[in-house]
Image (tube, rainbow, N blue to C red):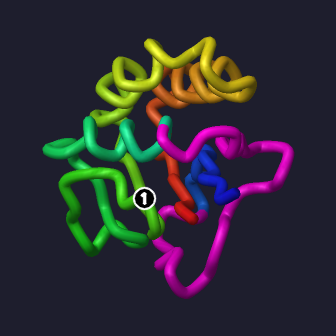
């Protein structure tokens, strides 16, 4: 079973290329969704058109990359929240992810999605 990790990117790491430097978040600051790959795959499909970046703020992207590293800017997080909210009861970590997204929105932070 694969898993997809979500985290809030520390401001000091925004300049990094995460394809090269890897995961910037402490494990306790991440949420893994791994019970049902179909949930995350559906979120990725629903994210088409969402402003995002592929591993670095230098590579624009227009969705969440299920198998790669995606950076989501603060402007995209309300849309991510709308995508995730309907699934809050389908996987045990989704409520934690919702809280993380809300925190990132409140603090205008970037998020990272580290795919399978």
Q: Residue at x 36, y 25 (%)?
A: 83
23, 43: nearer the viewer: 43
Q: Quadrant of the N terminus?
A: bottom right
Across and down, in percent, residue 5 comes to 64, 51
Report the side of 14 relative to 91 (left or right): left
Report the side of 96 relative to 51 (left or right): right
> Relative to residue 46, is residue 79 depicted above or below?
above
Report the side of 70 relative to 9 (left or right): left
Across and down, in percent, residue 11 comes to 56, 53
Q: Quadrant of the C terminus?
A: bottom right
> Relative to residue 82, is residue 71 depicted above or below?
below
11, 72: nearer the viewer: 72
Report the side of 70 relative to 91 (left or right): left
Give the residues drawn in magenta, as a range. 13-38
Q: Residue at x 37, y 38 (%)?
A: 42
Q: Which residue is drawn at 49% across and 62% down?
A: 14
Which residue is the site of mark 1? Answer: 66
Across and down, in percent, residue 77 comes to 38, 31
Secondary structure category for the residue under label 1: loop
Task: Answer whether residue 3 is magenta in the image.
Answer: no
């Amino acid at each position: 079973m694969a898993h997809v990790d979500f985290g809030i990117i520390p401001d000091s790491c925004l300049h990094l290329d995460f394809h090269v430097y890897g995961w910037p978040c402490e494990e306790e600051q991440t949420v893994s969704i791994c019970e049902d790959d179909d949930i995350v795959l559906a979120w990725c499909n629903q994210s088409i058109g969402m402003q995002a970046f592929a591993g670095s703020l230098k590579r624009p992207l227009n969705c969440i990359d299920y198998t790669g590293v995606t950076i989501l800017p603060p402007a995209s997080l309300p849309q991510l929240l709308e995508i995730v909210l309907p699934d809050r009861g389908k996987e045990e970590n989704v409520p934690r992810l919702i809280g993380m997204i809300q925190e990132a929105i409140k603090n205008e932070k970037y998020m990272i999605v580290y795919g399978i």
